[in-house]
């Protein structure tokens, strides 16, 4: 009888795929688990958005509008297309032109080269799936977005770190590494250069304007046996609080055949809608749509219609201003707390970002920050404050990973929570010095 424990059945092992093995024990899962199991801990780790600025009124108004007419309501509640709602893709032509400071006519952007996805993370995953075979290479900044490193590992690709400074990935280091690979006969394995262009997760640094153009030029020059693409992750582009506005890397790709632009509304509007989008070189659009068809044959159509309506009602830009005003206060609170509590600790320094959600902090070289370190245990267990260990954000060998860094997020906490969290973290650091 089914479920009868008295019947002895032979125990046989579960044989997982190689892809499942490649994605085991992702750090993001551990951090989420810690947050759920320890709700009393002040999290400076979570990259979640500010709850108080989530667009309830804007979403309510858009839903009411699209469901006002019964026939229209049935249309938006039906399946969409794999590529995404044409209505939203059309609105994004104007949106991208505005971000670039140009007219839609100057941009010459075809909405048919756009794809709508389940957040930008799905697009990053799809790109890795259609471009990278096991053993292929993606060049990344050191440090870079640690979840993307997991995405690369999930397809069996190798991430090679490239040195960075206060202007982002060093183009001389990128070119030197590509020349080294060419001399070693490994250039054929290089498929992708990954860059978080604005207020990078985790460092908060933006790639300089000069280096944006240089990245496209370098990718073209080294595309000898096959195309090397630049994947521009612009997830934080609209979260700018001060500092210069810069055109995207994608805007420097006049031929439209080298740069893949990935953006999302999760940070600027609502992560609950899970709408991201990309502008894709023509040769990649069909294979990405084919792969996406295997996963969902179209992300949530209703959610895409909500965003399209918000744009048509002219409510998106005002909401982004509100979000940025809130985050500006939080960023300033974290920087002020860093000055207050860490300013007199020798060997501690941090980045002052112009936007995004993170402050990147370096401790004295002998202070490690990893999950197994004395600092992490003191912070999480005794002081009840959480951060993201910086070593997670580095590709390459253990020797190439800086182990004295921390990523601190100001997105979730109130200014008072940020101040208290930074005070606790400083106590933890002093205790292990």
Image (cartoon, grey):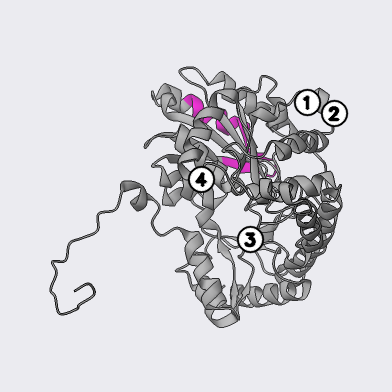
Dot 4, how many residues are within 10 Å of its Cα: few (below 14), some (14-19), or many (20+)?
few
Front tag of 2 and 3: 2
Task: State the residue in front, 95 or 259.
Answer: 95
Figure quadrant of residue 215: top right
The answer for how far apart the CA atoms under marks 1 and 3 are is 32 Å
Give residue 103's mark: 2
Give residue 296's mark: 4
The answer for how far apart the CA atoms under marks 4 and 3 are is 26 Å
Vertical order, 226 against 310 (above or below): above
Vertical order, 416 against 323 (above or below): below
The answer for how far apart the CA atoms under marks 2 and 3 are is 33 Å
| Coordinates of residue 280 in the picture (x, y in percent) | 61, 30
Give residue 107's mark: 1
The answer for how far apart the CA atoms under marks 2 and 4 are is 34 Å
| Badge 2 or badge 4: first in the primary sequence | 2
Front tag of 4 and 1: 4
| Badge 1 or badge 3: first in the primary sequence | 3
Check if mark 2's residue and mark 1's residue have beta carbons within 8 Å: yes
């Amino acid at each position: 009888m089914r479920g009868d424990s008295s019947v002895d059945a032979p125990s046989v092992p579960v044989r997982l795929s190689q892809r499942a093995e490649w994605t085991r024990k992702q750090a993001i899962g551990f951090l989420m688990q810690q947050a759920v199991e320890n709700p009393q801990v002040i999290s400076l780790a979570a990259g979640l958005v500010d709850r108080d600025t989530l667009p309830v009124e804007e979403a309510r108004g858009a839903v009411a509008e699209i469901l006002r007419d019964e026939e229209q309501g049935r249309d938006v509640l039906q399946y969409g297309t794999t590529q995404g709602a044409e209505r939203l893709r059309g609105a994004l032509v104007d949106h991208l032109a505005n971000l670039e400071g140009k007219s839609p006519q100057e941009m010459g952007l075809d909405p048919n080269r756009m794809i709508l996805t389940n957040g930008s993370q799905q697009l990053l995953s799809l790109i890795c799936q259609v471009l990278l075979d096991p053993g292929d290479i993606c060049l990344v900044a050191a440090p870079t977005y640690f979840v993307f490193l997991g995405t690369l590992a999930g397809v069996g690709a190798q991430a090679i770190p490239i040195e960075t400074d206060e202007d982002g990935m060093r183009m001389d280091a990128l070119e030197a590494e590509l020349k080294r690979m060419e001399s070693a006969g490994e250039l054929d394995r290089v498929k992708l250069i990954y860059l978080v262009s604005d207020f990078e997760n985790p460092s908060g640094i933006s790639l300089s304007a000069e280096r944006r153009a240089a990245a496209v030029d370098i990718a073209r020059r080294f595309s000898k046996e096959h195309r090397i693409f630049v994947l521009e992750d612009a997830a934080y582009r609209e979260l700018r609080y001060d500092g210069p506005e810069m055109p995207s890397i994608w805007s420097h790709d006049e031929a439209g055949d080298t740069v893949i632009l990935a953006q999302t509304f999760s940070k600027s509007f609502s992560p609950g809608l899970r709408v991201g989008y990309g502008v894709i070189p023509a040769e990649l659009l069909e294979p990405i749509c084919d792969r996406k068809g295997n996963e969902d044959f179209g992300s949530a159509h209703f959610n895409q219609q909500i965003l399209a309506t918000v744009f048509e009602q002219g409510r998106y830009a005002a909401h982004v201003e509100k979000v940025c005003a809130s985050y500006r206060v939080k960023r300033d609170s974290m920087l002020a707390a860093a000055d207050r509590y860490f300013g007199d600790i020798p060997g501690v320094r941090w980045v002052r970002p112009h936007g995004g959600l993170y402050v990147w902090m370096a401790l004295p070289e002998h202070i490690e920050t990893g999950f197994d370190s004395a600092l992490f245990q003191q912070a999480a267990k005794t002081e009840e404050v959480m951060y993201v260990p910086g070593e997670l954000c580095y590709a390459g060998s253990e020797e190439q990973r800086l182990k004295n860094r921390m990523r601190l997020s100001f997105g979730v906490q109130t200014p008072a929570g940020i101040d208290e969290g930074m005070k606790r973290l400083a106590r933890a650091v002093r205790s292990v010095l």
